[in-house]
Image (cartoon, rainbow, N blue to C red):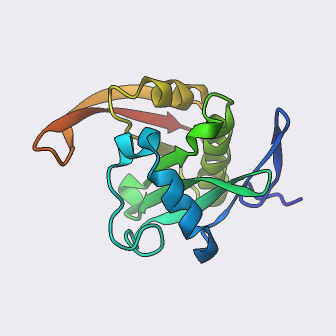
Amino acid sequence: MTDSPIGRVTRIGEHELSLRPLDPADASALLRIHATPEVARWWGEPEEGFPLSDEPDHTRLTILVDGAVAGLLQYWEEPWPRYRHATIDVFLDPALHGRGIGTQALGLLVEHLTSERGHHRVTIDPASENAAAIRSYEKAGFRQVGLLHRYEHRGDGDYRDAILMELVREP
């Protein structure tokens, strides 16, 4: 057992949950999960190099459930001290939806970002029509702070709105 949320094994129901740095061996399982209709609906088609090299400025973590690859968390950090914060994204294998696993994984990442990386503020921006994700993020402590109009290009010539959510930890 470790003090860091990364690598710590947490029980959730009958399952063991942990986060680890992305390993190249995780790529095929993450691509499989990304291709499921439930994930692809929100994430679109994976970029060339996903998940290993498509977003070099993001840090990616693999979500493990009972030792198996179950999803991905990623974060990006604003380095400028005046506006320092982190923003995150997540997807989870649809076979595990509705069990609190994504909410718990988000909690571990927020703990890492606040206690180890020194962030007081973390943001996430789900599509406004992704009600299940919004509920999960609220359960993890995020609150809605705004609507981002025509925020994300859907690839079909149209845009969708997103909800800006944040979690702020007081010093």
Q: Residue at the location (49% across, 26% down)?
A: 132
Q: Residue at the location (40% across, 73% down)?
A: 56
Residue 8 location, quadrant: bottom right
- Mark yes or no: residue 27 visible: yes
Residue 41 location, quadrant: top left
Q: Position of residue 108 (x, y in %)?
A: 68, 47
- In the image, residue 51 sits, relative to residue 169, either above or below, namely below
Q: Nearer the viewer, residue 97 or 36?
A: 36
- Mark yes or no: residue 87 visible: no
- In the image, residue 92 sits, relative to residue 52, either above or below, namely above
Q: Position of residue 122 (x, y in %)?
A: 48, 45
Q: Residue at the location (50% across, 47% down)?
A: 90
Q: Nearer the viewer, residue 170 or 1?
A: 1
How many badges with numbers are in the image? 0
Q: Position of residue 52 (x, y in %)?
A: 48, 73
Q: Residue furthest left?
A: 157
Relative to 87, is 60 on the left or the right?
right
Q: Residue furthest right?
A: 1
The N terminus lies in quadrant: bottom right
Q: Position of residue 146 (x, y in %)?
A: 30, 28
The C terminus lies in quadrant: top right
Relative to 141, is 129 on the left or the right?
left
- In the image, residue 5 sits, relative to residue 165, either above or below, namely below
Q: Residue at the location (60% across, 46% down)?
A: 110
Relative to 106, is 50 on the left or the right?
left
Q: Nearer the viewer, residue 3 or 56?
A: 56
